[in-house]
Image (cartoon, helix red, strand yellow):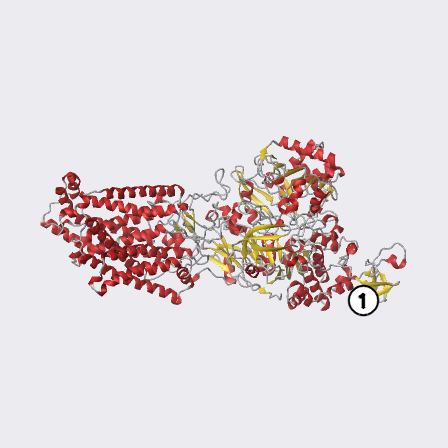
Amino acid sequence: MQALSAGPQIFRTAHANNCDGSCGLSVTVTDGNITSITAADFGNPDFPARICLRGLSQLQYVYHPDRLKYPLQSVGPRGSGQWQQISWDEATTIIANKFAATAQKYGPTSVYIAPYTGSLPVINGLIGAGYRFASVIGASAGDFEGDNEGDSASPCGANEILGNFDGHELSDLRNARMIILWGNNLAETDIPDMRFVLDAKDGTITSAGQTTPNPTGPGAKVVAIDPRYTPTATLSDEWYPIRPGTDGALALSMINVIINENLHNTSYILNYTVGPFLVRQDTSMFLREKDLAGGTSTKYMVYDTNSKSVVPYDQSGITPALNGSYTAKNISLKPAFQLLTDLVNQYPPSVAETITGIAASDIQSLAEEFAARSPAAIKAGFGGISHWYYGDLTYRAMITLSAICGYIGVHGGGVTTYNGALLDAALDLGDWLNPDKLAYTYLPPIQFCTAVLEGKPFQVKAAWFPIDNFVNQQGDTNLTISAMQALDFVVVSDVFMTPTAQYADIVLPVATQYEREDLLAGGNYFLQYMPKIIDPLWESKTDLDMFGEVAQKMGQGKYFDQSPEDYLNLILSGLPSGLTLDTLKSEGVVPLADQDYGTASFQPITHPYVPYYKQNFPTPSGRIEFYAESLVPYNMPLPLYKEPIEASPTNPLYQKYPLVFISSHTKFRTHTQWDNLPWLREVIQKPFLEINPTDAQARGINDGDMVTVFNDRGSIQVVARVTNGIKPGVVNSYQGHWNNGDFPTATVNNLTHQKINPAQSVVFLFQSNTAYYDVLVDVKKS
Amino acid sequence: MASEDSVLQSLTKTGTAFYVFVLALLVLTGEFLYAWYTQLTTGLIVTGMRSIYNAPNYMAPYVAGGSPWGIYITNFIFWIGISHAGIAISASVRLMDLKKYKVVARMAEVLTLVALPMAGLSIVFDQGRPDRIINLLIYGRFQSPMLWDLTAITTYFMGTIVYLYLSLRGDIDELAHKLPRREWFYKRLAMNYQGTETEKQRHNQTLWWLALAIVPIMVTVHSVVSFVFGLMIARGQWYSTIFAIYFVVGAIVSGVAAVYSLAWIFRWLYKWESLITDEVLKGISWALRNVLIIYIYLWIAEELTTRYMGDSADLRVSDYLWFGPYAPIFWTLAIFGFGIPAIILLKPIFGKRHFNPALTFAASIILNVALWVKRFTIVVPSLLNPPLYQTGVYIPTPTEVSIMLGTFWLAALLYIAFIKLFPIIDLDLVKG
Amino acid sequence: MKLTMVIDLSRCLGCWSCAVGCKLENNEPIGIWWNRILTTGGQEPDTPSGDYPDLKMTYLPINCQHCDNAPCVKVCPVAALTKRSDGIVFLDWSRCIGCRYCLVACPYGIPAFNWGPPVQSPDNSQFQIGNPAVPVRPVGVSEKCTFCFQRVDVGNLTPKCIEVCPAGVRFFGDLDDPNSQVSQIIQTKPTVRLREELGTEPSVYYVPPRNPAIKVQVT
């Protein structure tokens, strides 16, 4: 952090909104006002400074005339927009009393605290003060990955096959020879990391105004798989417009081609996957040594082709089989790899062509190239892959595809959705989130409505939504609103009067990230210090302060009586190499991948960071479990392909609603944030529905017409954008729009649902996926 | 033969109709001033003009932009065109010794004198910073066609005002005797005019040379106006070698038609059939017809050049006019705006009895309206169809129209002021 | 010195970051953009041309081309527009009379005009945003990209748009210096300039886009 002697001062901070960019921001302050912003350096030549249009618009966010200034109390029916200003003291007293009363009547877990991803830093954000508060008052809380954004299915799948959810540092893409951007529109959703894809394609290393050839970069072929012709697709070498939700079938078919053409990496499969482990055909569980020999050994068993017998996997000098059928003690056995082969043989390219709409010859060549261009990386999107009911199956199939080619844990390979996920694990958050071992009760956000309306798994009667535009973003808005109306008491703390805040009894004004001290760990492999740059505007307060005040009035003030610095020191104390807050402050940004700052569970040993570099997988077997026992009760130990739960032609509902409705992410917002920033609004202008000319003509719709998109759950009214850039049979409207005077019913979640996939409960922290894209609609002219 | 008193009617007689007419003009002028005030305090945003790339406004349809020039510039070209009235007649009269038309010479010169300031006023309306107009004089750069305009128009104006004064001087002196109540005014204005033969001789000689000098200035004026557009490589259908002569001929059509209109109006108003005879009117309409034919010929040449093998930028603008949103305007203009006057003007070829002064008057009015619209179709469609961007939209606002019309009300008031002070026909023609 | 800009269309994402950065640096009011991103494709922004699935779309960031033979410089009646010796075509906002001839003459449709009183966001009533060396422009004057003269004049050859581009698309420097980044790109890659046939000699060079291979699908 540098300060000039006179005139403007420059502060380094990080952009800690819900974006994987996590850019460093260099903020200029003149006379106590933020007057400019630009990209801040990371002190690393391979990871250039980065920023995008959203970071550059932040002044309009901080100084927006609509910012909440004072605490407000609702004086009319919920949602009526009638407010009166009250003092902080009054507000926190009311909240404390109401929470205490609710807890008394219905039990402490009837109070639900829902911090979410609107803000990502450790104190005032996603893993922050809200959870600490929930823990000390014994409330229930949503978990940061059990999110209402459809970002659970992929992590769930990753956990099932690899044991956790992690990703490559994205600068590693420069080491790939092929990159598949699968259901991922990086060019809009993670703009600064698109640089690495382009550098990989061009064989360059670029930074602001500079380009040099990359001496070690092999140059990559870039492939986009997406039903839309996105900016990402237009920069790729090939574009495959897939039927939405059928990505699993494509992955299985590619595995089919690779196995049948003998292009798979046999030794990798033998050594690092459960491929050779024998599976009992009667129980579908792995054969254990004790099943044959008695005793207690739970060692996995393989079939040794040398001795032609079933032996423990770790016996020396054996050559385990990957294929075949065997019997031992009258138990029918098959190696897991054989079961995988049997599965993928149901999906030759000709079958996958019918399912996905991609030509068989294209699937064939794509698979062959994927195997040949070693290493090949898969960058998957939360949107395209995880926003589906069976997203975990799809993600497992994709990881399996990468694994059989030996691309897991190597530079230039892997399957990455989010990078920096484990950075939080590097920090010891236990004492921060669970002081004195007090713990909140986890309630997956997708179960919130049921908890409120039906009392299952337990009754929820009061809620506080910090950092969460829940009403706008949860699936099935009508259901969500009915749950909000059924609550006894609602608190919303936010920067603006969001659609969620409209349903509150008390609204509290929040200080933006520039008005408080914090630390960002996530989005990339750097710890970024976030100083307090300006004083909070109006009467806004930080999360830490407001939760502290309420906790104080509920008798738990001792857990909030320290300063942000104290808590940051607490959080950093978990790092074994003793990175201190002072060092972090003076450096501004510290790379984790280079230094030995990791905890036992996070061992970055290579740069750029590559997970599983040592081929250690935190699964029960310690290997890549493309066959997972935990899913046997749900009949899907293998990554099966299943048609989407709703958005499928096999669904009878399809006769009524023949269009698949997806709600992707626009570059002009970060989810719902920045919807009201003038510069960004100038360009995006209005909410619209992308529709193919074939579908539009059939409905008499012309470009620019107002249309109604509808299904049994609700409807929206937006402007039609007729474009050839979307697959026929699919329509898209960008999520995150706030209803306003000109477009009062345009929130896409009027159309989505809250269907829960019970199979995903096998991973405790990732069972709350919302399948936003798994939706059918029809469209008519308004 | 009409008498001097007849000619002096305009100075001596003031009926109710006159007062009503002037009152109406003053009311309209008031409205114009208010509209202009709004524009001066708020900016040009009160008009319908917008930049070539106009940032999409939130919730507005995606429009690439608008036209940065609109009816003010059109109005400027129009008034410059009208200003060709004066010298067209004066030149004919003096240089070619066509005494027949002396009777309409002065009304034409006054028209020029009123038209040129109206053109200048139109430009002032169009500036974003009229308070910085002085910069044109301090920093004016001669590489710019606009500076050529400024120079040529100023020179033309100076020349015409001197010309008018010199030819008016004798009448002013006369009026000093005839209207004793205003003697103090006319005496001063006459500036010691003696009325001797030598003086008259000198006047006539000066006027002859002045007329000769003003002719090339007239040609230059509308040529430089055309160069503002014709030298622009960027715009479709503007970059054309014949723009100068195209505009000059168009201006002559404008001017001559305006003279005919005025001549007919005064003849009708003051019953001057014996002064402004059918022969005179026929002569003017004969000249009008000839220049109109030349103008239509040049127009056809322009259209053919574009449509035959024109480049995409030109064709895009032409399509916009021929088949696009402006097609109704364009074809109405061609068929009714020019076609009907052409037919009316061509009819007298087939015998003298076919000349109908009233009908020709209608033709002259239609022609000037048509020429106003014609210049609009030159200025705006090209700006609405910029290469690299989508087609824009331009709709003049009521405020903008009020301001533009202000030039017409002011012109009328100025003209009426003149005919109230000076004879509109040279008194030499009615002296015994 | 011959200041030149290179924009690599084979990499441009159409993200508008350069445009927004410029808007911030120069405190541009609502409705005015010195730097815009055009979509070369369908009628609407971010839509492709062609019939599904044979599609094509590229982005074209466009700002003042700082032509050597600038039509705007020629037509400005008060010489508010001048070509500097370093190549920047500079518009003196204090002299402009608002005649908009530069808007009309520019083949690229670049100059923007303050039709009404400028409204900045955040508004300038409390403080000015962006670079304080850039004056606030009043109503009735034109404005356009200056190649960040305020940075060039203090020796910083990195305009804001180059500084903030997240994808390695934009480059800037002195074409007279054979070792500069722009010289190297122009020497090694084929580049084009916009509407070159008009003879304006723009100072902005574009690396052409690459067309992706299209996968024709069956169903």
- Residue A505 in sight: yes
Furthest toward the right, the residue is A294
* Kind of residue at disc 1: Gly
Q: Quadrant of residue A293?
A: bottom right
Instruction: Count neighbours of disc 1 (C-alpha within 10 A) and say few if under 14, some if 14 to 19, many if 20 or more.
Output: few
Depth check: A494 or A750 in front?
Answer: A750
B37 lies above or below A391 = above
Q: Which of A182 and A473 is in front in this view?
A: A473
Viewed as shown, does residue B109 lie left or right of A154? Answer: left
Which image quadrant is residue B10 in?
top left
Q: Is residue A58 left or right of residue C34?
A: right
Q: Residue A36 at what x, y percent from top left?
A: 53, 43
Is residue B137 at all visible to an observer of this figure? no
Judging by the rendered image, the residue that carries numbered circle 1 is A324
Residue B22: image location, x then y, percent: 26, 43
**Which is nearer the eye, A7 or C124?**
C124
Q: Find residue A317 and report its image quarter.
A: bottom right
Above or below: residue A61 compared with residue C57: above
Chain letter, disc 1 residue: A
From the image, which quarter does the N terminus of chain A lie in? Answer: top right
What residue is shown at x 60% (from left), y 65% (from top)? C215
Q: How many marks?
A: 1
Per the image, label 1 sits on a secondary structure element best described as: loop
Task: Give the image location of residue A675, x and y in percent.
Answer: 56, 46
Direction from residue A341 to residue A544 in the image, left or right: left
Residue B72 x %, y %: 35, 50
